[in-house]
Amino acid sequence: MVGKIGEPVRLAILGAGTIGTIHGLCSLEAPEAVVATVWSRSAEKASQLAERLGAMACKSVEEAVSSPDVDAVLVCTPTFLHEAHTLAAIQAGKHVICEKPLTRDLDTARTVIEGARAAGVQLHVAHVLRFFPEFCRLHDLIQQGAIGQPALVRMTRASSFPHGSGDWHNQITQSGGVVLDMGIHDLDWLLWTFGPAERVYGRGLYQRGVPFLDYALLTLRLRSGVIAHVECSWAEPAGFRVHGEVSGDRGMLAYDSLDSTALRVDLRHPPDTPPGVNVPTTYTAESPYVSQLRHFARCIRGEEQPAITPEEAYESLRLALASLDSIVSGCPVSL
Amino acid sequence: MRVGLWSLTHLHALSYIPLLRDRRDVEFVGIADEEPERGKRTAQEHGVPFFASADELVAQVEAVVITSANVDHSPMALRAAEAGVAALVEKPIATTLSDARAMIRAFESAGVILATAFPCPFSPAFGELVRTVRTGELGRVLAIRATNRGVMPGGFFIQLERSGGGAVMDHTVHVADLLRRLTGCEATEVYAEVGHGLYHQDWEDSGLLTIDLSDGSFATLDCSWSRPKSYPTWGDVTLHVVGERGNATADLFGQHLSLYLTESSAPSWRGWGSNLDALMIGDFIRAVRESRPPRSGGEDGLKALEITLAAYRSAKIGRAVKIEESA
């Protein structure tokens, strides 16, 4: 069960939807990882993905995680199942790589973190933005003082409404909506880059009963004095757009996926798009998802220190939940 | 119609002077300025008369454009009203609600027009956005993300005793006014985080406002002076509208060419969109001639100022402020 130096970490994938498939396919490009078992609520999806990966499709979570061929478990199920599936992995004594957000609320997040600690297994949360080259470069340039002392930040993450399995994203209490599912990327990046938050104020469609649409505008004050605006949108008609802008006392860094891409393919007669979840792509030598998987696998093998700790993932979740609290109460929420 | 311009303190004066001078339907009588040297020089450069006495200028015109420092709008406008002269007052209409209300009352009792200098409603793109929203093409409007960012303007803008405030005072009113026009709703509550981190001065250089509207929709406005000196243009006015059936994005000054010079490292943008100042001046002149309300009257200026002052109060007390609380 402990990953061995030089040998690939053997993974169980729980959930064979959009993100489970991405991680699975990334494992084919990651020398440090190999998928051994796959489980999904849909047996058909599980066997399809298992077949592509040369892995074994399992009929139960138990079977997938307890296999002696498995060192670590990749939890790629919908958010509301993260707690149960992460705990199942921990109970089987396996390391865990969990998709973001860690869980749906803070109590369960704490249970999972404590559970992993008590069992002596590693817990990694896939805040993949930390592996996206544009956001790494933005982070690094700011740390290097390229714009002086940062003061004002604007971030946008916008996509069409995701259509995951059983449209679970539309069950806002299950998914936490766009803030918890997608905005948390930007909130995590803000905390990583500028330090802890002082308070957040938000407006959004959360709990307003608009089906298949979610949108939020958040304003944050960080303890460093930085103020930030975060737009979280599942209201785009199509596609995925990311924008970031950081102003400091010596200049400004700006990024927009619309005018900073190396390749765009526009089909005149696009085939009918199957339902799924939009995921941004980066045309770099190694996909951010591959970099992330390789990093977690190397951590499990004891070769690297984690780029993101469970406590950091907990803080990102806390900030996202505080944003939802502000949207619901209408008042600023202190962290 | 005889028209004058009073004060060169606000840089928009330099845009309005040639527009007034070159109109065939008005006689541009001249300019008055608190700084005689600057006034004479500018008058000469534009080939228009200079008046050492503002009272003398006001006495000779039917309408005056007031482009002074923010805190001087009110006393100057009141003098115009006393003389029975219509006024187009640079935004913000004033720096306090009591000043703005006194101005509205004075022009009402004088029976002449008071207009607020809001050029953005004349943007054809904004006009089309309003049409798109009002015909229901976008469905119910749920949220609006807006910006009115700019280069830090310097001058009187950063002298608090003359400007009444920094970026929030300078850049809230345009979008505040556009939100009212677009939705047909009034603002009910305002929250603001302001910052001083770009220039580290006593005036705020950045502001992030959240504005609730009476129909339950919400908006944010970034009013910061966050464009660096090397930015290719002065700033922007943008509105991203999220509706139940679709989104619309307006970039009111987005029509531009990019100019790259062999000898300069920074490119610049040259706008080719409609001249909104010219359209606004034209509306003001016709309003005075026809004795009809201008596109933006004193009330519009007052409503936009209410939102601005609520933002300052919110930033001070750290919670959202209802518009009636600040009034």
Image (cartoon, coloured by chain):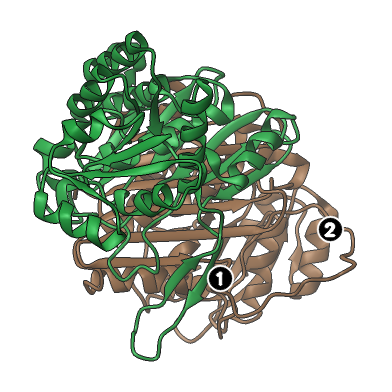
Chain colours: A brown, B green
Q: Residue at x 72, y 49 (%)?
A: A237
Task: Classify A47 as above or below A324.
Answer: below
Q: Residue at x 62, y 39 (%)?
A: B127
Percent from the top left, x then y, of residue A122?
A: 41, 60
**Which quadrant holds residue B74?**
top left
- Number of residues whose C-alpha sits closer than 10 Å to that of mark 1, classed few (under 14), some (14–19) or many (20 or more): few
Q: Amino acid at mark 2?
A: Thr
Q: Are marks 2 and 1 in contact (CB under 8 Å)?
A: no
Percent from the top left, x then y, of residue A15?
A: 69, 54
Q: Quadrant of the N terminus of chain B?
A: top left
How far is disc 2 from disc 1 in space, using C-alphas?
A: 24 Å
Q: Is residue B89 left or right of residue B275?
A: left
Q: Quadrant of the C terminus of chain B?
A: top left
Task: Classify B28 as above or below B272.
Answer: above
Q: Residue furthest bottom?
A: B262
Residue underneath mark 2:
A273
- Number of residues whose C-alpha sits closer than 10 Å to that of mark 2, classed few (under 14), some (14–19) or many (20 or more): few
Residue closer to the observer: A100 or A92: A100
At numbered mark 1, what does the secondary structure look like: helix, strand or loop?
loop
At numbered mark 2, what does the secondary structure look like: helix, strand or loop?
loop
Residue underneath mark 1:
A259
Task: Classify B47 as above or below B120.
Answer: below
Task: Report whether residue A321 is seen.
Answer: no
Percent from the top left, x then y, of residue A58?
A: 75, 58
Residue closer to the observer: A74 or B264: B264
Q: Amino acid at mark 1?
A: Asp
Residue closer to the observer: B106 or A256: B106
Q: Residue at x 63, y 35 (%)?
A: B130
